[in-house]
C-alpha cells in the first residue's frame, strides 16, 4: 500500500473475477475510477513502490518482472522547475 501526493491510497493484488490489479482508494476506502483497477502486464503482483514523479512500480512473483505504471498516481513532490517558479521548493503539490 502506498499513498500519493493527493492522499489517494494505492494497493496491488489479485481480485476475484477481475484478476491482478493496481487499484486506487479514497481516504474513506472507496474504490476510485476505474473500480476494476489497472491491469497492465501484472502476473502475481506482490509489492509496489510509488516514486516521487507518481509512477507506480510493481514486482511480479510469477514472472520475476517489474511493471511500471507511468504517471498513474499524483506526484508526491512538486517538480523542481515548477517549485522554483512558484517559490515552493519542498512543498507538496
Image: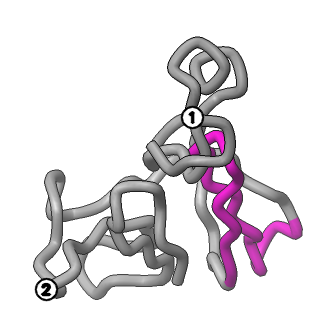
Mark 2: few, some, or many residues within 10 Å (few <14, many ≥20)? few
- Left or right: where 88 falls relative to 61: left
Frontmost of labels 1 and 2 is 1
Give me the disc on residue 7: none
Q: Which residue is drawn at 56% across and 47% down?
A: 91
Numbered disc 2: secondary structure: loop
Task: State the residue position of label 1.
Answer: 88
**Residue 8 magenta-drawn?**
no
- Residue 49 x/y as whole percent: 70, 68
Q: Residue at x 58, y 12 (%)?
A: 85
Image quadrant of residue 93? top left
Q: Which residue is drawn at 52% across and 83% down?
A: 1
- Left or right: where 61 falls relative to 48: right
Image quadrant of residue 43? bottom right
Numbered disc 1: secondary structure: loop
- Left or right: where 30 falls relative to 65: left
- Residue 14 x/y as whole percent: 44, 83
- Residue 55 x/y as whole percent: 62, 45
* Magenta stretch in the rendered image: 47-64
Q: Do the residues labelled 1 and 2 touch (CB within 8 Å)?
A: no
Q: In the image, is residue 79 above or below residue 22?
A: above
- Left or right: where 87 falls relative to 26: right
Quote the CA–CA distance across marks 1 and 2.
Answer: 29 Å
Q: Which of 53 and 39 is in front in this view?
A: 53
Amino acid at each position: 500500500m502506498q499513498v500519493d501526493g493527493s492522499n489517494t491510497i494505492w494497493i496491488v493484488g489479485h481480485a476475484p473475477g477481475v484478476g491482478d490489479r493496481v487499484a486506487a482508494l479514497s481516504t474513506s476506502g472507496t474504490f476510485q475510477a476505474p473500480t476494476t483497477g489497472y491491469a497492465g502486464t501484472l502476473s502475481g503482483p506482490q509489492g509496489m513502490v510509488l516514486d516521487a514523479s507518481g509512477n507506480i512500480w510493481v514486482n511480479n512473483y510469477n514472472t520475476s518482472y517489474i511493471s511500471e505504471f507511468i504517471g498513474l498516481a499524483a506526484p508526491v513532490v512538486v517538480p523542481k522547475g515548477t517549485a522554483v517558479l512558484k517559490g515552493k521548493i519542498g512543498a507538496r503539490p
